[in-house]
Amino acid sequence: MQTLEARHLADLTFPEVSRALRALSSAYVERRGRLGEGTALSGAGKRAAFALFYGPMHYLLVRAVVRGLPEAAAAGRTLVDLGCGTGAAGAAWATAGGPPPRLVGIDRHPWAVGEAARTYREFGLTARTERGDTSGPWPKSPRAVLAAFTVNELDQAARDALLSRLLDRRLPGDRILIVEPIARSISPWWNGWRDAFVSAGGRADEWRVPVTLPPLVAKLDRAAGLNHRELTARSLWL
Ligand SMILES: C[S@@+](CC[C@H](N)C(=O)[O-])C[C@H]1O[C@@H](n2cnc3c(N)ncnc32)[C@H](O)[C@@H]1O
């Protein structure tokens, strides 16, 4: 948090970042249809808001999810962080327990890829990052694949292709974790994915995680008119 704060608040004031956070939240909730254009991460303010607010939130959520799923905490040898953003979710899983995996962060957005590389480094993880799409190459099995708050940004064709790639082409020892917001309006495809995971022997869960947010995240939370005492998410695990 200190490193993030020093870098992202070097050229921006707190009111600028909190204004950008409100714009970013509205891009995720009200203007979802335009996410594919990549505008959510355009501009220093929104990038700072993403790194300082959503990154830590996703870190806390994914850490709680992997701790709550028996056998999930140890990610195995290789962890693919799909749609890695700033790398927060991948870092959370990689450091949740067991020997840390080698991380491969993949994102279509060039800023995100650079930011994820820094995050993994801050956590002392061995990692490489790639600019790419969810349909691109992945490291060999056995591997863990994490898609945290990413599947809802895909169009239907990409989403369908990802589901069959995850489930139909998995090999023994592979692990899959999908994490998404609970709001139905954001993930109308959820029930289909949930049924497919459960039929394949996986499980679906909803999470309510009591949190004390880091001070800067709490300040941004209040400035954006939110007041998180708990974080929520749902997950698919196989
Ligand atoms: C809401 S962010 C989540 C980032 C990170 N997983 C986390 O939990 O903080 C979604 C990320 O998915 C990326 N993304 C969206 N569509 C993608 C695609 N087709 N291929 C690769 N990355 C994609 C975006 O650039 C963005 O960084």
Image (cartoon, rainbow, N blue to C red):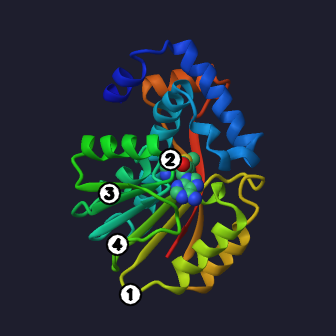
Residue 109 badge:
2
Residue 172 badge:
1
Q: Position of residue 152 (x, y in %)?
A: 65, 57
Residue 94 badge:
3
Residue 95 badge:
none
Q: Is mark 2 within 8 Å of ligand 1?
A: yes
Q: Name the side, left or right, on which 234 lies relative to 68.
A: right
Could you tell which of marks 2 and 1 lies nearer the N-terminus? 2
Can you see residue 159?
yes
Secondary structure category for the residue under label 1: loop
- State which mark lies toward you, 2 or 1: 2
Q: Residue at x 64, y 67 (%)?
A: 158
Instruction: Specify the amino acid type for callout 4.
Output: Pro
Disc 4 and disc 3: Cα gap in Å?
16 Å
Could you tell which of marks 4 and 3 lies nearer the N-terminus? 3
Q: Would you call the spot at circle 2 few (<14 residues within 10 Å), some (14-19), or many (20 or more)?
A: some
Tag 2–tag 4 contact (CB < 8 Å): no
Disc 2 and disc 1: Cα gap in Å?
31 Å
Q: Would you call the spot at circle 3 few (<14 residues within 10 Å), some (14-19), or many (20 or more)?
A: many
Secondary structure category for the residue under label 4: loop
Can you see residue 148?
no
Could you tell which of marks 4 and 1 lies nearer the N-terminus? 4
Disc 1 and disc 3: Cα gap in Å?
20 Å
Could you tell which of marks 3 and 2 lies nearer the N-terminus? 3
- State which mark lies toward you, 4 or 3: 4
Tag 4–tag 3 contact (CB < 8 Å): no
Q: Residue at x 39, y 54 (%)?
A: 90
Could you tell which of marks 1 and 3 lies nearer the N-terminus? 3
Disc 2 and disc 4: Cα gap in Å?
20 Å
Q: Name the side, left or right, on which 173 lies relative to 109.
A: left
Give the labeled residue for mark 4. 139
Q: Is mark 1 within 8 Å of ligand 1?
A: no
